[in-house]
Image: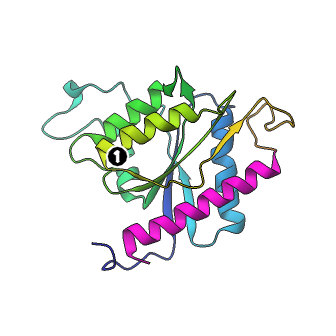
Amino acid sequence: MAGTAVAPSVIKVAAICGSLRKASFHRGLVRSAIEICNESIEGMQIEYVEIEPLPFINTDLEVNGTYPPVVEAFRKKIQEADSVLFASPEYNYSVSPPLKNAIDWASRPPNVWADKPAAIISTGGGFGGGRSQYHLRQIGVFIDLHFINKPEFWVNAFQPPKKFESDGTLLDLESKERLKQLLLSLQTFTLRLKYGK
């Protein structure tokens, strides 16, 4: 119950990227978030959690209430995190297949997403991946994730000035500042929701 637990000295955030491309802009957003935390946000640490090794969701792989070792390891990372940061690319107006697969594995009993504070970042053309964020929020309702509402964060990757290097590194200073504000909001929300601070 909120208010009864002692807040940790460092909030642990599990960062998950829905793109498997090594040089993707979404991975660049996660790297930038990690750098911002390390350099200017005291009391919060982001760990990138890889989803590429996860097999396709298949309940035939569940044996006597256990999961394949790679799935168990992923679920443990989510369970141990205080909150979650999703980098969510948009595929056909929705979340990417690898991200949905990871979400489904971690929602199997017991659902390790339950009661986690979370935030979403995205980039792309036009709406900057914003439609994937809406679908991710809908998924979050069922698996008991609690997303921060403000600030929202998405970047139009192709509108001048240049936002990313070809390797996915975020260049845009205004986007970096907006990303920092989102992380600070996630930190505040996590402390309030989980520890009553």
Label 1: few (<14), some (14–19) or many (≥20) C-alpha neighbours in 10 Å = many
Q: Residue at x 42, y 62 (%)?
A: 82
Region in magenta: 172-197
Q: Residue at x 51, y 71 (%)?
A: 10
Magenta stretch: includes residue 180: yes
Could you tell me if residue 18 is visible in this image?
A: no
Q: Is residue 115 left or right of residue 85?
A: left
Picture quadrant where residue 17 is located: top right
Between 133 and 39, the one lying in front of the other is: 133
Q: Is residue 50 above or below residue 35?
A: above
Q: Is residue 95 above or below residue 192?
A: above
Q: Is mark 1 on a helix, strand or loop?
A: helix
Q: In this view, does 162 lie to the left or right of 109?
A: right
Could you tell me if residue 20 is visible in this image?
A: yes
Q: In this view, does 167 lie to the left or right of 154?
A: right
x%, y% of residue 79? 35, 54
Residue farthest to the top?
Answer: 92
Residue farthest to the right?
Answer: 161
Image quarter in which the C terminus is found: bottom left
Between 44 and 146, the one lying in front of the other is: 146
Give the dominant element type of the magenta stretch: helix, strand or loop.
helix
x%, y% of residue 177? 74, 56
Q: Which residue is drawn at 25% across and 40% down?
A: 108
Magenta stretch: includes residue 185: yes
Q: Residue at x 41, y 31 (%)?
A: 100
Picture quadrant where residue 126 is located: top right
Dot 1 amino acid type: Arg
Image quarter in which the N terminus is found: bottom left
x%, y% of residue 144? 31, 50
x%, y% of residue 91? 53, 23
**Disc 1 designates what residue?**
75
